[in-house]
Image (cartoon, rainbow, N blue to C red):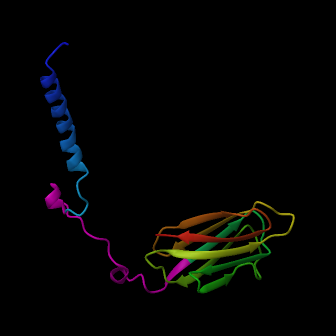
């Protein structure tokens, strides 16, 4: 046996302690404020829906694109607003519509039902919602056949 085992063990413990100290500092508790964690910036909670005024309806642009023209296309936003997009629409690859809806903090769920002719399969349907003063959110749904019934979630 070469060397001194107790000294080797102490050196290994010292190296582990040196690696642990900065890691514990970086991965500290997220509930600390900046002053407690050693930085000058306090951590503040996100504003609530009441503080930001999200509870009132806002203008939203709805855009639907599909690889084939649907014979039926219906969206139900948050179980309340039913929008029939295929009725009377001249299909040129996309449909754009301006809506006025409430955007809750948990986002919007849209139930989508679409139908295509029997000879059409594997259709891509891209749905995007863009608030007037916000970022666009897009969801792409795929059909396995001539029908599509699926849920699309838009979270800001």
Residue at left offset 23%, top offset 58%? 29
Quadrant containing the N terminus in the rendered view: top left
Work out whether 155 lies above or below 80.
above
Residue 101 x, y percent position in the rendering: 53, 83
Residue at left offset 18%, top offset 43%? 21
- Residue 90 sits in quarter: bottom right
Residue at left offset 14%, top offset 60%? 35
Q: Compare residues 128 and 149 and report the one nearer the observer.
A: 149
The residue at the far right in this view is 119
Residue 99 x, y percent position in the rendering: 58, 82
Q: Is residue 40 visible?
A: no
Residue 70 x, y percent position in the rendering: 77, 71
Residue at left offset 74%, top offset 73%? 114
Provide the residue span drawn in magenta. Answer: 33-60
Work out whether 94 lies above or below 18.
below
Q: Is residue 6 left or right of residue 146?
A: left
Work out whether 28 lies above or below 89.
above
């Amino acid at each position: 046996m070469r060397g001194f085992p107790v000294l080797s063990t102490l050196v290994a413990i010292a190296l582990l302690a040196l690696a642990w100290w900065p890691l514990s500092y970086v991965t500290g508790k997220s509930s600390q404020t900046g002053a407690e964690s050693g930085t000058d910036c306090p951590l503040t909670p996100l504003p609530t829906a009441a503080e930001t005024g999200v509870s009132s309806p806002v203008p939203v642009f709805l855009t639907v694109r599909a690889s084939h023209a649907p014979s039926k296309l219906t969206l139900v936003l948050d179980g309340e607003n039913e929008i029939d997009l295929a009725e009377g629409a001249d299909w040129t690859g996309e449909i754009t519509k301006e809506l006025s809806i409430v955007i809750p903090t948990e986002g919007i769920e849209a139930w989508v039902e679409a139908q295509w002719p029997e000879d059409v399969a594997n259709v891509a349907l891209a749905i995007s919602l863009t608030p007037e003063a916000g970022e666009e959110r897009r969801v792409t749904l795929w059909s396995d056949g001539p029908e599509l019934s699926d849920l699309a979630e838009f979270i800001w």
